[in-house]
């Protein structure tokens, strides 16, 4: 198996890097988006984009998050490193079937906005790379778009 690296395009976030960092470096905020009481509303708002999104048993606290995603199974992750206003490194826990690291990098651009890029490091064998490589290329940008479009000033 080899580590594969997928890098998003650089996205503009309509909030300053301090506000974005403070939100993303505390995974507890995900409860407001993926908690059971909010999943149906989120799917409604996302429309076709939510097709196949069946997150179950979601839990999160400041440093970690866990959920079931059929057919993949349980995904558990935690924040491995924080660099104030610049970087959040999230890694998979041992209970997850595959190893990955997700880096969210922030760069201030002005008082009201920042730039963001996401890098995913995932361990894939050649067969898996052939099966999901293109989907991960596309998916990393969709994740980056989703994170860039969070209304940081209102959550």
Image: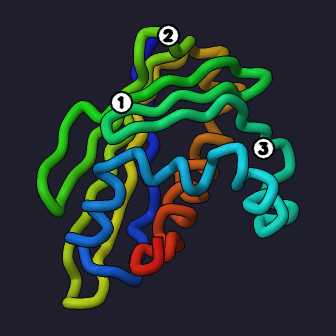
Residue at image coords 28%, 89%: 112
- Colour mode of the rendering: rainbow
Q: Which mark is residue 78?
A: 1
**What x and y, as percent, mark residue 131?**
71, 26
**Residue picked out by circle 2:** 95
Which circle's residue, 1 or 2, is located before the other in the chain?
Answer: 1
Mark 3 crowd level (few <14, some 14–19, many ≥20, 10 Å Cα): few
Residue at image coords 42%, 46%: 28
Q: Is residue 95 left or right of residue 136?
A: left
Residue at image coords 26%, 47%: 88
Mark 2 crowd level (few <14, some 14–19, many ≥20, 10 Å Cα): few
Disc 1/disc 2 C-alpha distance (Å): 12 Å
Q: Secondary structure at mark 1?
A: strand
Q: Is residue 116 left or right of residue 144?
A: left
- Quarter of the rendering containing residue 12: bottom left
**Residue picked out by circle 3:** 53
Residue at image coords 27%, 71%: 19
- Quarter of the rendering containing residue 27: top left
Between 24 and 147, the one lying in front of the other is 24
Between 142 and 56, the one lying in front of the other is 56
């Amino acid at each position: 198996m080899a580590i594969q690296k997928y890098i998003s395009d650089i996205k503009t976030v309509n909030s300053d890097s301090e506000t974005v960092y403070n939100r993303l470096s505390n995974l507890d905020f995900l409860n407001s988006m993926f908690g059971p009481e909010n999943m149906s509303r989120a799917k409604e708002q996302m429309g076709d984009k939510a097709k196949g999104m069946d997150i179950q048993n979601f839990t999160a606290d400041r440093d970690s998050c866990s959920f079931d995603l059929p057919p993949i199974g349980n995904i558990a992750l935690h924040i491995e490193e924080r660099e104030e206003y610049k970087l959040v490194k999230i890694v998979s826990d041992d209970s997850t079937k595959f190893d990955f690291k997700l880096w969210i990098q922030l760069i201030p651009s002005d008082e009201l906005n920042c730039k963001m890029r996401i890098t995913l490091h995932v361990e894939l064998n050649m067969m898996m790379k052939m099966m999901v490589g293109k989907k991960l290329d596309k998916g990393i940008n969709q994740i980056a778009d989703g994170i860039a479009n969070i209304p940081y000033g209102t959550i």
